[in-house]
C-alpha cells in the first residue's frame, strides 16, 4: 500500500495548512513557526479574557 493510500483526509487538510503557512512566510519555515506561535498566543489571550476565571476553576456541581 502506497503512502498516499494511507493518508486520511484530516491529514491532507493539515498538510495543506502547513504548506499555506510556509508559503505565506515566503518559504521560511522558522518564520512560519514564529507566526503560528504568535497567533496561538493571541488566541489563548483572547480566550482567557472572554471566559470567566471562575468558570474555568470551578468543577460542575453533580446534581
Image (cartoon, grey):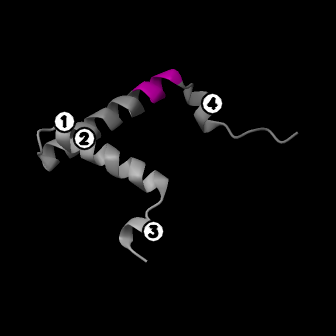
Q: CA distance from mark 1 to mark 2?
A: 5 Å
Q: CA distance from mark 1 to mark 3?
A: 28 Å
State left or right for residue 43 relative to residue 34: right
Up the image or down, 21 lies above or below 11; here it is above
Q: In terms of depth relative to the viewer, which is nearer, 39 or 24?
A: 24
Q: Nearer the viewer, mark 4 or mark 3?
A: 3
Disc number for residue 24: 1
Q: Which residue is mark 3?
A: 6
The kind of secondary structure the magenta stretch mainly shows is helix
Residues in magenta, as a range? 46-50
Q: CA distance from mark 4 to mark 1?
A: 37 Å
Quadrant placement of the N terminus:
bottom left
The image quarter in which residue 40 lies: top left
Residue 62 % position (x, y): 83, 42
Q: Which residue is mark 2?
A: 21
Residue 48: in magenta span: yes
Amino acid at each position: 500500500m502506497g503512502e498516499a493510500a494511507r493518508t486520511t483526509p484530516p491529514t491532507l487538510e493539515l498538510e495543506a495548512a502547513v504548506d499555506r503557512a510556509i508559503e505565506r512566510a515566503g518559504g521560511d519555515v522558522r518564520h512560519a513557526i514564529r507566526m503560528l506561535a504568535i497567533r496561538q498566543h493571541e488566541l489563548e489571550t483572547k480566550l482567557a479574557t472572554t471566559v470567566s476565571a471562575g468558570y474555568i476553576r470551578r468543577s460542575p456541581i453533580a446534581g
